[in-house]
Amino acid sequence: MAGDVPLLERLAQLPPLPAAEVAALVERLVAPQGDPVVGPLFGVDEEGDLVVNPLVPAVLKSFQEKAELTCYAALLEGLTGIWNAAVRAAVVARLRASGLPLDDLLLRLGALSPTLGFAAETPEWAREWLADPFTQDALLVQQCVVRMLLALRAMAEARAAELTTKLG
């Protein structure tokens, strides 16, 4: 039964949808600020003009620059980025709570999973991140959320087209 299949597996079974098509979807939305999924990324200013979250154009540009990127892959990239930021924050909180000196903390972080990002970066980057992890990862997480919302909305639109075509 389709309802029993985990969401990511169901989404993976959809026909691949190029992420570059997300921009066309956004342009087709009559009132994007009223959309239940991507609406929070848009608004209307005092003059009645549409305003866009500054991350939206950057994400759309990245979608268009990667011709091979699918919406499903963009969704997974977004989830992965949020996961990595969450794990990084949890690991650092635990290591800090243990009372490790900063240099030992940096050495331990560098030895951990490469997905935490510390091994691949310079020691200066790691020190900056440790000084203010919120600022360092908040933008990453926000970009990932925008990426996921746009990809999900486009995949839902493709699924809706498929379902309504079957009806009639």
Image (tube, rainbow, N blue to C red):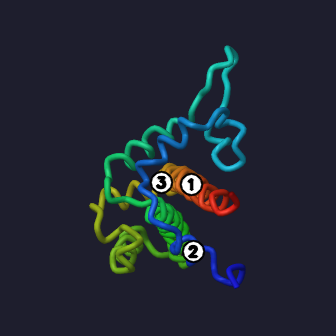
In terms of depth relative to the viewer, which is nearer, 50 or 120?
Answer: 50
Residue linked to disc 2 = 8
The reply to whether discs 2 and 1 touch (Cβ–Cβ < 8 Å) is: no
Quadrant of the drawing holding the N terminus: bottom right
Q: Amino acid at mark 3?
A: Leu
For residue 23, above or below residue 86: above
Residue linked to disc 1 = 145
Q: Amino acid at mark 1?
A: Val
Q: Indicate the position of residue 16 as horizontal and vertical percent values.
A: 44, 64
Q: Indicate the position of residue 128 as horizontal and vertical percent values.
A: 39, 54
Indicate which disc, 3 or 2, sits on the residue closer to the N terminus.
Answer: 2
Indicate which disc, 3 or 1, sits on the residue closer to the N terminus.
Answer: 3
Element assignment for label 3: helix
Q: Residues within 10 Å of mark 3 (few under 14, many from 20)?
A: some
The reply to whether discs 3 and 2 touch (Cβ–Cβ < 8 Å) is: no
Q: Is residue 9 left or right of residue 4?
A: left
Residue linked to disc 3 = 140
Q: Indicate the position of residue 64 as horizontal and vertical percent values.
A: 36, 46
